[in-house]
Image (cartoon, rainbow, N blue to C red):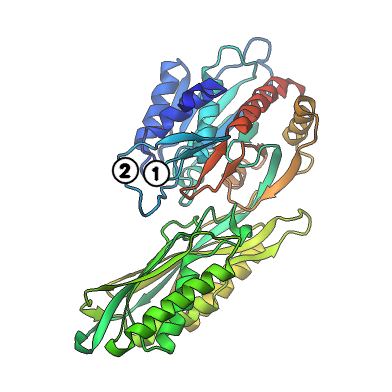
Amino acid sequence: MIEALKPTVVWNYFYELTQIPRITGHTLAVASYVERFGKNLGLETLRDEIGNILIRKPATKGMENCKPVILQSHLDMVPQKNASTVHDFFTDPIKPRIDGDWVTASGTTLGADNGIGVAMAMSVLSSKTIEHGPVEALFTIDEEVGMVGAFNIEETFLRGWILINLDSEEEGQLFAGCAGGQDISVSFDYNDIDVNPKDRLAFRIDLTGLKGGHSGVDIHLGRANANKLMFHFLHEAFFIHDAQLCAINGGSLRNAIPREATAIITIKKEKEKELRDLVEDFQQAFRTEYAGIETNISFSIKNVAHPPTIIPPTIVSRIILAIEGCQNGVISMLHDFPDTVESSSNMASIISRPGNTEVRFLIRSASERKKSWVYNSIESIFTLAEAAVDNENAYSGWQPNIQSPILNLMKRTYETLYGKTPAVKVIHAGLECGIIQGIYPDMDMVSIGPDLQYPHSPDERVNIASVEKTWNYLTETLKQIKNI
């Protein structure tokens, strides 16, 4: 049981969080849990109109004059599971388990992003021994889809001067900046065509087994995007083998690299073997192209009942050509921070419904100008394809301040604790710091966290030893706040 791991207080709170369904958009239960927690401690506990929870704890004796510190984390988690896993994210608890040096889940996302941060903040609030100045713990809702909680914080809600975000994913790294982002929605509208299936067969094509992952943290790893791979196949099936497209569905979450995609297509009866051979050829090509990156690619075909309609071939042609030509993955790198992505695009989801096919992207950039360029490139391609293009949920990046007092204090504290200098980085993922900085421009910020791998995928795991190191680091930092 993970509750026996050290520090036990953190792991016990984290375990309690895993037992509460808390996917994005459905955080009422976990917010109420944290709200009760604060009130039961006798601490000032507030819930704002959007649903964020703020708990204030007075300073320990002798530290009343320290600058107030905000510990910030988000309550929601990403719901991803393997196709073979039976799990209802609306009702079922996560099943955490120890796997060597790591804690992971059984076929689902773990929710260490950002449950470990929530658990650490709760542990500070409940402690009777940690030395600290005035503390505010801010628990935001719905970070994973649009950072809704952070966007709706009122200017008078927070009192703290310093913010320590607990949502980064590399122990020993201090994050001092992050990329901004923007959602793009592309829509093709049409009238489905009724068909007579007497001379054609229908097939379901499934692409599964990809690693996926966080579209900010893992985008530089070169993992396959299921949507792009499926449309590589559809390009040849449609233009060379006279296939028809009935339906397409790939990916689900804006900030997760798509792991699976499914298409329903039809083909002339005499071309069945030709199609099956094509699927086998593409499976081998995908495995060869992504050897060493993806290890379980499966591209399969099976007969299904013929649907009553198809997507108009003129529309299918435009969709395929636009998606094939569209940028996806890393687009540019930061020169001042080696090995850090500057700009990227994630073709997050594609879904067809009667009369409509929608494609959704999340683009990110540390540069507002580059973000605009990426958006323009995607908008241009799909406008030429006669689709409607819309954008929403744009948020600015968090601009790094190398002279930050909290950053420099935490560098010194880490050196004292562990005998080495922590790296200072800018993260390509979106952190709520950028949004909060826009509301509180004078707030001093830094982000830390334990080693967390493969977030937003069923392979998500958090390193046990790094949780303890991060906890000790956080508590020592709170003690040293008196030196700012």
- Which residue is at a point 45% across and 40% down the rendered structure image? 105
Q: Residue 270, which numbered label?
A: none
How far apart are labels 2 and 1 at the CA level? 7 Å
Whether 394 is drawn above or below 71: the answer is below
* x, y percent for residue 366: 66, 57
In this view, the residue in front, 88 or 156, is 88
**Could you tell me which secondary element the residue under label 1 belongs to?**
loop
Mark 1: give few (<14), some (14-19) or many (20+) Cα within 10 Å: many
Taking the image as shown, residue 478 lies to the left or right of residue 149, namely right
309 relative position to 178: left or right: left
> Is 341 above or below relative to 16?
below
Residue 96 appears anywhere in the view: yes
Which corner quadrant of the image does residue 162 belong to? Answer: top right
Q: Amino acid at mark 2?
A: Phe
Quadrant of the image containing the N terminus: top left
Tag 2 secondary structure: loop
In the rendered image, which residue does mark 2 sit on? Answer: 90
Furthest toward the top, the residue is 61
Q: Nearer the viewer, residue 205 or 263?
A: 205
Q: Give the residue type at disc 1.
A: Ile
Q: Position of residue 96 (x, y in %)?
A: 44, 35
The 10 Å Cα crowd at callout 2, few under 14, some 14 to 19, many 20 or more, is few
The residue at the point 42 percent across, 50 percent down is 80
Q: Is residue 154 visible?
A: no
The reply to whether the C-beta atoms of the residues labelled 2 and 1 are less than 8 Å apart is yes
The picture places residue 218, in percent across and down from the top left corner, at 59, 54
- Mark closer to the chain start, 2 or 1: 1
Which quadrant: the C terminus? top right
Which residue is tagged 1? Answer: 23
